[in-house]
Image (cartoon, helix red, strand yellow):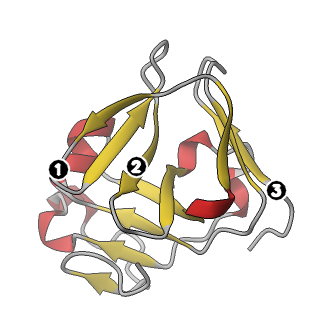
Amino acid sequence: MPSAAITGGCLCGSVRYRCDEPYRYAVHCHCSMCRKSSGAAFMTWVCLPREAFRLTAGTPRPRRSSATAQRAFCPDCGAQIYMDYRGSGTIDVSVGTLDDAGSVTALDNIWVEERLPLMKGFDGDLPEHRQFSPRS
């Protein structure tokens, strides 16, 4: 895991963030809500310590996606930046928004019962979980 600050932002650069602690873990989420909100076959989330995460530019537009989760999007380019689960100790950041996404290693596939057939076997060496990772 990286020891330097984690930074990132949206496609247009209007919303930027920083985290001064290493990420806790990363997961590939196959749930239908992640697919619908991203337009992708799955989402890879980097879970950052909530207390160390801060916005450095812009204000994302929040959208409640469930009773316990709120997703944040850039109001200008529409990029999904992060997801905030009520009561969790992390902010789950979309790996595609990281300035150094190559430094991230996913540890789990989650919500695998909702995985698209075309993704069967993707990162098959990772543990698979019906819902959330036990790390959360």
Q: Are marks 1 and 3 in contact (CB under 8 Å)?
A: no
Q: Residues within 10 Å of mark 1 (few under 14, many from 20)?
A: few
Residue where numbered disc 1 is placed: 66
Instruction: Locate residue 117 relative to residue 128 in the image: left or right.
Output: left
Q: Quadrant of residue 22?
A: bottom right
SS state under label 2: strand
Instruction: State the mark number for residue 5.
Output: 3
Q: The disc labelled 1 sits on which kind of residue? A: Ser
Vertical order, 81 against 3 (above or below):
above
Residue 92, given in percent of the width and then of the height, sits at 47, 57
Mark 3 or mark 1, which is nearer the start of the sequence?
3
Mark 2 or mark 1, which is nearer the start of the sequence?
1
**Which quadrant: the C terminus?**
bottom left
The outermost residue toward the top is: 76
SS state under label 1: loop
Residue 41 visible somewhere in the drawing: no
Q: The disc labelled 3 sits on which kind of residue? A: Ala
